[in-house]
Image: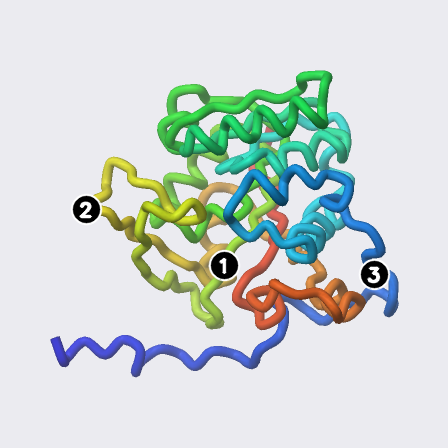
Amino acid sequence: MPWIRSRDRATPEPPDRPAGPPSGAPPGSRTIERGFFDDHPRFFETSETSSYPWRLNLRHAAIFDEYADLFPGARVLDIASHDGRWSLAALEAGADSVIGIEARPDLVGHAKANLAAYEPRGRFDFVAGDVFEVLASERPEVDVVLCLGFLYHTLRHTELFTRIRQTSARHVVVDTEVHRSPEPIVRLADEGVEREGNAVADAYTYGDTVLTGRPTLAALDLLARTQGYAVERLSDWDGLLRDNPEANQIRDYRIGRRATVLMSAAFPR
């Protein structure tokens, strides 16, 4: 269809730089000498998806160091919990308990084994199933939701934020690929379902691909506000990248095509 030329009409992308404002942290204050995953090496073996030391350690810093005050005593929901890497990080950050939901049963098996090895007190539970179906049927009540690496693997964003609101969570941490534009838009894409790090088939899947959407930061803010959340701040990727110049496998964060965002509830408890 030669008349469809959406790329020609798209707003030019901004210059390459991390998402968010320039770092206000003193130089050297975000240096990572030894990261969380250096002490938990099982996670380098139990996933085919982005299991690179620098990438995982910097993401841990951007989530759990940046928002350390959220986790002590909290009930945490880990959406698309993969091999349990972030569920364990939440527990070691002080969470009281974690529920992980993951669609791929083999990854649920890895998560249970990993946390059994590192967290013998059993403060975790992993559910194998579609995130939307499990949240609709189980209705867990939690304090913090982790939505890390999932948002851009679906187009069901409104439904997702509705289900998150129904958990009564006061805080939501989202780590996602974003489309770089100042406008509140979502860029469509399709993904094959075979690859471990891609979307999984759901009730709307036709064939072997799933329709997905990468929101801009403005779109993410709008989506959150329609369900009673507000973007509080973005993680300081500018400082992390400045102070760890040797870090690799993180180009998407370096050029602002991925961001880590804290949202807080604006609705009454």
Q: Mark 2 points at which residue?
A: 207
Q: Residue at x 73, y 34 (%)?
A: 71
Q: How far apart are marks 2 and 3 (CA)?
A: 46 Å
Mark 1 residue crowding within 10 angstroms, few (<14) / some (14–19) / many (20+): many
Left or right placement of residue 79 versus residue 67 in this view: left
C-alpha distance separating marks 3 and 1: 24 Å
Query: Crowdedness of circle 3 by 10 Å Cα count: few (<14), some, many (20+)?
Result: some
Q: What element carries label 1?
A: strand
Question: Which of disc 1 and disc 2 is earlier in sequence?
Answer: 1
x, y percentage for residue 237?
69, 63
Q: How crowded is mark 2: few (under 14 residues within 10 Å), some or many (20 or more)?
A: few
Quadrant where the N terminus sits is: bottom left
x%, y% of residue 246? 74, 69
Expressed as whole percent of the image width and height from the top left, the position of residue 96 reads: 71, 23
* Quarter of the view holding residue 144: top right
Residue at far top of view: 121
**Residue type for callout 1:** Glu
Image side of residue 132 versus residue 109, left or right: left
Mark nearer the N terminus (3 vs 1): 3
Which quadrant holds residue 124? top right
- Residue plotted at (69% across, 57% down): 54
In the foreground, 207 or 232: 207
Relative height, residue 142 to residue 46 (above, below): above
Residue at image mark 3: 31
**Secondary element at image label 2:** loop
Q: Which of marks 2 and 3 is nearer the N terminus?
A: 3
Q: Where is residue 19 in the image (x, y as percent from the top left)?
A: 61, 67
In the drawing, what numbered circle is on residue 177? 1
Q: How many labels does the image show?
A: 3
The amino acid marked with disc number 2 is: Gly
